Amino acid sequence: MVLCYTLNMKKNRGLIGFFIFLVYGLLAPTIIVPVIATIFIGKFAFGKRVGLTLKHETIEDYPDLDFTPTKFKSGKNELDAYFVKDKNISDYKAVLIMAHGIGCSRANYMARYEYFAKKGFIVFAYDCTGTCKSQGKSIKGLPQSQVDLENAINYVSSIDELKQYKLLVYGHSWGGYAAATVLNTNTAKKLTAVATLSGFNDIWNIIYYQVTKYATKIILLAKPWMYLYFMALYGKRALYKGVDGINKYNGNVLVIHSKDDKTVRFEDSVAIHKDECTNPNARFIIFEDRGHTLARPIEIENKIKKTNKLHKTTIKMGKTNIFEHNVNIWYEFSDRREVNKVDDKFMDIVLDFYEKALQKSEAETK
């Protein structure tokens, strides 16, 4: 069964590769065919909404936290969000805006909200465009996370009751890309510190890596067309790179990645560009064995990997977004509590970064 599946996968990759060669190699002079093909690829990957994943958590799982619902605009769409506070704390350190990964939602980061809320932060979490409770016919494209984060920052900074607090950002995966690339914009001036975790540096390399799983390396022929597609949707935002944003910002930035990350490869990460970084206030931490999530205890991360290898998924993709499908099948046979558990020792690293950045900022304003 496994051998047949592997052979069929290789056969399909070959057929898709031939199709890509035909469209982008031989028919490129016609322009119209490659454009249609590129739109089709874009719609296939990003043209659907993302719902709640199977192993998400709920507000009811965290009775000690206070969730205050709110909404804000990102383009034409209204995004659903909430502020998260610890019910036993009234003296807050700062507002922490958290950007989630692709294929999931804010509901997959509840344990991280709890960690920071209990440390005295007001956490602001939202569903990106086309995700769960937020509006949007689809997630649209990779640069959308940066657009949504920028609008989230502008929204939070406009609330009078919160203007006394410094603004921080925590972005993971798709959100990690957003956290770094948003620093290319003027919105970055409103931020005191940014942490980008498991983030990819630019849109092409991550597209190339993911698409080669279903096709072949001949997808390189589509590179200029994919850029044109995303530039038509997002303009210059499609060209933003994470390391450029960090250098332009010149403020407090924490970059974390693990070399065994199979979702965002280290070679596609923001972290691999450490030697290109000219920002003296940027700190890079590179792990060997923390996987993509980073915040999960290593022993549980390894357990999930082993469990995943022992079982064959029973989940059909159907009309599900491909990224949501990938999240669901990865955690299909794992315990929900373990999937969402955080490693306090790892989180303490991020906390220490934020607290030092806040102390530095306070000292500079005196």
Image (spheres, rainbow, N blue to C red):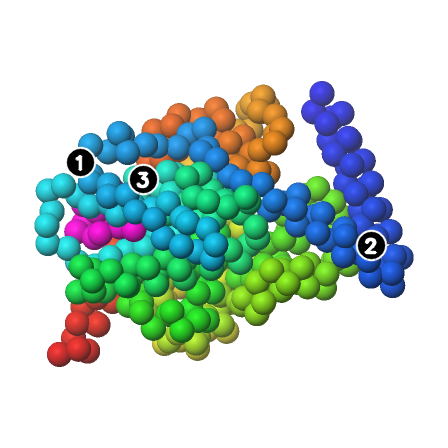
Q: Position of residue 182 (x, y in %)?
A: 44, 65
Q: CA distance from mark 1 to mark 2?
A: 56 Å
* Region rendered in magenta: 114-124
Q: Earlier in the sequence, mark 1 or mark 2?
A: 2
Q: Which three-letter amino acid code belongs to the residue tagged 1?
A: Asp
Question: What residue sits right under mark 2 in the picture?
Answer: 33
Q: Residue at x 55, y 45 (%)?
A: 138
Q: Residue furthest front?
A: 76
Q: Quadrant of the N terminus?
A: top right
Which element is circle 1 on?
Answer: loop
Front position in the image: 263 or 189: 189
Question: What residue sits right under mark 1 in the picture?
Answer: 64
Q: CA distance from mark 3 to mark 1?
A: 12 Å
Q: Position of residue 184 (x, y in %)?
A: 46, 71
Task: Say the numbered circle drawn on residue 110.
Answer: 3
Q: Is residue 72 within the magenta segment?
A: no
Question: Compared to 199, does 305 lie above or below?
Answer: above
Residue 267 in view, yes or no: no
Q: Which three-letter amino acid code belongs to the residue tagged 3?
A: Met
Q: Is residue 40 left or right of residue 186?
A: right
Q: CA distance from mark 3 to mark 2?
A: 44 Å
Q: Quadrant of residue 29?
A: bottom right
* Disc 1 and disc 2 in contact, CB within 8 angstroms: no
Q: Is residue 228 left or right of residue 124?
A: right
Q: Which three-letter amino acid code belongs to the residue tagged 2?
A: Val
* Disc 3 and disc 2 in contact, CB within 8 angstroms: no
Local crowd size for mark 3, using a 10 Å CA cut-off: few (<14), some (14–19), many (≥20): many
Q: Quadrant of the C terminus?
A: bottom left
Q: Residue at x 44, y 56 (%)?
A: 74
Q: Residue at x 37, y 76 (%)?
A: 250
Which element is circle 3 on?
Answer: helix
